[in-house]
Amino acid sequence: MVIVMASRNREDIDYVVKRVEELGYTAHLIEGVERTVIAAVGDGRGKERLQSLESLKYVERVFPILKSFKLAGRESHEEDTVIDIGPCTIGGKQFVVMAGPCSVESRDQILETAHCVKEAGATILRGGAYKPRTSPYSFQGLQEEGLKLLKEAGEATGLPFVTEVMTPEQVPLVSQYADILQIGARNMQNYGLLTAVGKSDRPVFLKRGMMSTIDEWLMSAEYIMAEGNTAVIMCERGIRTFETETRNTLDMSAVPVIKKLSHLPIIVDPSHGTGQWDYVGPMAKAAVVAGADGLMIEVHPRPSEAFSDGAQSLKPERFAALMKEIQVLVELCGKTLDADTGAAIGAGKN
Ligand code: PEP
Ligand code: MN
């Protein structure tokens, strides 16, 4: 931690040095021309109490040298994390496309969609069985029946699938079926849920909260990793801004920022990020070039009949055309849409 003094008075400086040492840190005094700075070196346990020194009128600022996301941060883990999901790997040379409907609505709908997205080149199926809806009167998802249908569609196509889990109680059941557990934007700071998925052996797809900073999002990843589950996949899905033309503002700059701050893979969701099907393609292409490890795209055989998020869902033929355009960019960026055989960490705990 770094303590910038507002005062050059000897007694004030001595008092702060004494407090730093009482908290178990070693104090190094740096006396500049205009400011005196105290570097407090220690293991971080007294960090919050050191921070409280900022309330003294002769202390200007107290701030950490290292980021607080120790497990999720690149400072402690230089190599990119590569996560093994059955036939594909996330975070390596493979550019992963996860596609499927917002909600699982029926057996026919999910099977038809799974076959279409597989044919177009997607390698992971998505679909919501438990839906976090703004209104309690909206469709809440087929729940366990939806999980069974996803499993069937996954087996029929050979695609692993990702689906949302909304409560800690649902984690064991959803883990029985799903290959990847999704934490939705509305639950990014549900610490009980993060802790529960952190104890599970399934990789976790962590969506960014719509009002969360990148730092808060990485701290949520930290919650999962601190429980032993290091297979965390970050997903940028847009944040709330003053803009009303799009459902959310897709923060594409989060891609290079996450790449710099963290070793975890990052996926972009242009469907929720824009809210409108005709903006999905351009933002999907931008994500490839920005350096994302993959995309999550909502696809529905008949978007006009969708139970949720029809306006942002691509028809299968539009999705297939987009995949062709993406392929060129993926290759240009030195990646491939095909399954990777490179080294990867096992799913979940390792
Ligand atoms: C979803 O993936 O359908 C979903 C509800 O996403 P988000 O949590 O990003 O709104
Ligand atoms: Mn959706």
Image: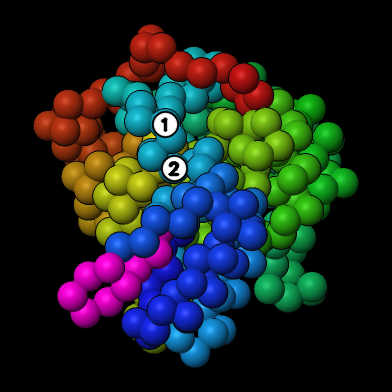
Three-letter residue code for mark 2 = Gly
Image coords of residue 36 (percent x, y): 32, 73
Q: Which residue is mark 2?
A: 73
In the rendered image, residue 35 lying in the magenta stretch gets the answer yes
Instruction: Give 338 or 48, whichever is nearer the viewer.
Output: 48
User: Label 1: few (<14), some or many (≥20) within 10 Å?
Assistant: some
> Is label 1 in a helix, a strand or a loop?
loop
Q: Residue at x 55, y 70 (%)?
A: 51
Q: Residue at x 74, y 32 (%)?
A: 200
> Is label 2 in a helix, a strand or a loop?
loop
Whether residue 302 is visible:
no
Q: CA distance from mark 1 to mark 2?
A: 7 Å
Residue 33 placement: quadrant: bottom left
Q: Which residue is mark 1?
A: 77
Q: Is residue 305 found left or right of 88 in the rendered image?
A: right
- Looking at this view, name the residue that lies furthest to the front: 10
Q: Is residue 329 found left or right of 206 in the rendered image?
A: left
User: Label 2: few (<14), some or many (≥20) within 10 Å?
Assistant: many
Range of magenta residues: 31-39
Image coords of residue 201 (percent x, y): 71, 26
Q: Residue at x 29, y 37 (%)?
A: 323
Image coords of residue 343 (percent x, y): 41, 12
For the residues bearing labels 1 and 2, Cβ distance under 8 angstroms: yes
Q: Residue at x 62, y 52 (%)?
A: 24
Instruction: Give 218 or 317, whichever is nearer the viewer.
Output: 218
